[in-house]
Amino acid sequence: MFKNVFGSGFLVRTAHVVLTWVVTLILFLHDTDLRRLEERGELARPILFVLLVLLSVLLYFAVSLMDPGFVLSDDDSEAKLALSVSGEEHQDMISQCKSLRQRRCSHCLLQQPMRAKHCQTCQHCVHRYDHHCPWIENCVGERNHRWFVLYLGVQLLALLWGLYIAWSGFSSAPTWDLWLRANGILLAVALLVGVISVVVVLLLGSHLYLVSRNTTTWEFMSRPRISYLKHCGADENPFDRGTLLNLWGFFCVWGLVAWEQAYFREAGDPA
């Protein structure tokens, strides 16, 4: 289920963890609300902040090391269909899939299920491929996409709280030179946290929008080149079941989905 922690992303993961805890330590060492609460013996909020940061780190490692949904054999697509349909319906759906596209990956030489794509970095085809994220050094796919969105939400909460804490620690000074000497490190932390917060807001917002439409970053960006979407109109998505059902399916339905079944039942035969 999890990849090797000492793989190619070891340096990236180490940098993320070190940066996270260095920023947290600086917020505690300076004269911020956290430190003032700690000195007064009011430990509830400082402990809650540390637990939130710890949760964000644990989610980061979970998303980074989790199998995103690698396609391991030619039987993956048919096995998923067999779980949801049977008999003549199963055989008919398999024949429909083959009539639509016979795409064998030129890199790993496996038959690609619908919505799968080969990742050049991971060297695997991934079920319901969304994108390869260099910050987690892993693909975002069907198995870890919901955890990726959850991680972004928790990370955003920690960042915004950290930004507020940094702001509470700025002290006044008679000149700009003295002010920068007193607050330089805290200012650098605030700017770093602010920039990362903007990035996380944009990422979280875009992913929630795509999830609400049951589409992926790859499908959104490369729609004209994808065989099973070429025949659809600009605003047509054969996987879209409405915002609420899309969100329910994304966050609450576990396991790999037979997208061929949803495609042919909802969109009909594209021919």
Image (cartoon, rainbow, N blue to C red):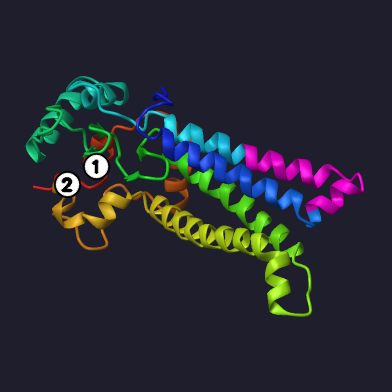
Residue 79, placed above or below residue 52? above
**Quarter of the image holding residue 182?**
bottom right
* Circles 1 and 2: CB atoms closer than 8 Å: yes
Chief secondary structure of the magenta portion = helix
Identify the image quadrant of the N terminus: top left
Count of labels shown?
A: 2
User: How crowded is the residue under tag 2: few (<14 C-alpha within 10 Å), some, or many (20+)?
Assistant: some
In front: 29, or 43?
Answer: 29
Residue positioned 79% across, 79% down in the render: 174
- Residue 246, position in %: x, y? 42, 47
Residue positioned 21% across, 39% down in the render: 120
Q: Is residue 65 visible?
A: yes
- Residue 132, position in %: x, y? 32, 43
Q: Which mark is residue 91?
A: none
User: Is residue 18 on the magenta stretch?
Assistant: no
**Residue underneath mark 1:** 263
Q: Which mark is residue 228?
A: 2
Which callout, 1 or 2, points at the residue further toward the start of the chain? 2
**Quarter of the image holding residue 266?**
top left
Q: Amino acid at mark 1?
A: Tyr
Residue span colored magenta: 34-54
Residue 76, placed above or below residue 33? above
